[in-house]
Amino acid sequence: MRHAMKIFGTAMVSFALAGGVAHADELAGYQAIPLTNGPNRVRLQGHDVTVVLASRENFNAHGFTLATFYLRDKGDDGKEAWSLLPVFEKQKGEENEQYGVTISGGADCVLHDIRLLSGGKDQPALLIVANRELGQSYADDAPVHFDYYALTENEEGVPGHPAFYFRATHSTKARANYCDVNDAFKKELHLGQ
């Protein structure tokens, strides 16, 4: 059975990678979408998408924010409906579904953060998740990895996948070590806040 997943605007996503190292030029034509706490309404590839950032305080330096994604589309009955827009990542060759992405860190540095990018009409929307290894402590400079996800449509209704979702495409590693992943976003991918 043929499994066709359409990535908006292209048959395939191709990125110029040199040994898996992050490069800002692979994001030419993309526009970063600023996100704030609460609901953020955006248009991605002609669809209404709401990104909700909600904080989870725990009264120490390690509270976190959860980002969840929702897409308004037509339901099975033809009426407009909101659908969860999950993130499918690959770990050890297996595809895992997540219902949100965590933004977190400590008092000194952010260890996990995201950037949402619009590709206009011709390129798929991208979600980039930056994760820093813990190292010896929360305040250390350590390797940062960028995981890329493309907004994908399950046109043929392949079982196990929703109509729309973010699909893992590739990962890159920052050239330098960082304490805060936002510094890595700014210096390596030119995606400052």
Image (cartoon, rainbow, N blue to C red):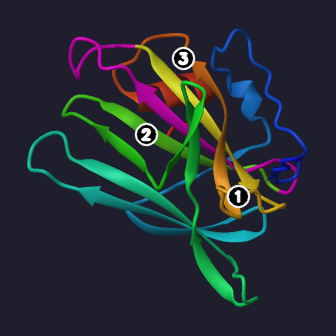
| Location of residue 139 in the rendering, given as x and y in whole percent from the top left corner | 23, 20
Relative to 111, 69 lies left or right: right
Kindly indicate the quadrant of the structure image that contains residue 189: top right
Determine whether 65 is above or below 41 in the image. above
Earlier along the polypeptide chain: callout 3 or callout 2? 2
Q: Going 80% across and 21% down the picture, which residue do you hit?
A: 16
| Location of residue 49 in the rendering, given as x and y in whole percent from the top left corner | 62, 68
Residues at marks 1 and 3, CA–CA distance in whole angstroms: 35 Å
Magenta stretch prevailing secondary structure: loop
At label 1, the amino acid type is Pro
Q: Which residue is mark 3?
A: 174
Residues at marks 1 and 2, CA–CA distance in whole angstroms: 30 Å
Magenta stretch containing residue 138, yes or no? yes
Magenta stretch containing residue 5, yes or no? no
Magenta-highlighted residues:
121-142
At label 3, the amino acid type is Ala
| Location of residue 174 in the rendering, given as x and y in whole percent from the top left corner | 54, 17
Spot the residue most to the front: 1
Kindly indicate the quadrant of the structure image that contains residue 141: top left
How crowded pointer 1 is (Cα within 10 Å; few <14, some 14-19, many 20+) is rated as few
Q: Going 30% across and 20% down the picture, which residue do you hit?
A: 134
In the rendered structure, are the residues bearing label 1 and label 3 in contact, judged by CB atoms less than 8 Å apart?
Answer: no
At label 2, the amino acid type is Asp
Q: Which residue is mark 1?
A: 159
How crowded pointer 3 is (Cα within 10 Å; few <14, some 14-19, many 20+) is rated as many
In the structure shown, which secondary structural element does the residue marked by tag 1 occupy? loop
Relative to 79, 84 lies left or right: left
Q: Which residue is mark 2?
A: 113
Q: In this rendering, which labeled residue sits more in front, label 1 or label 3? A: 1
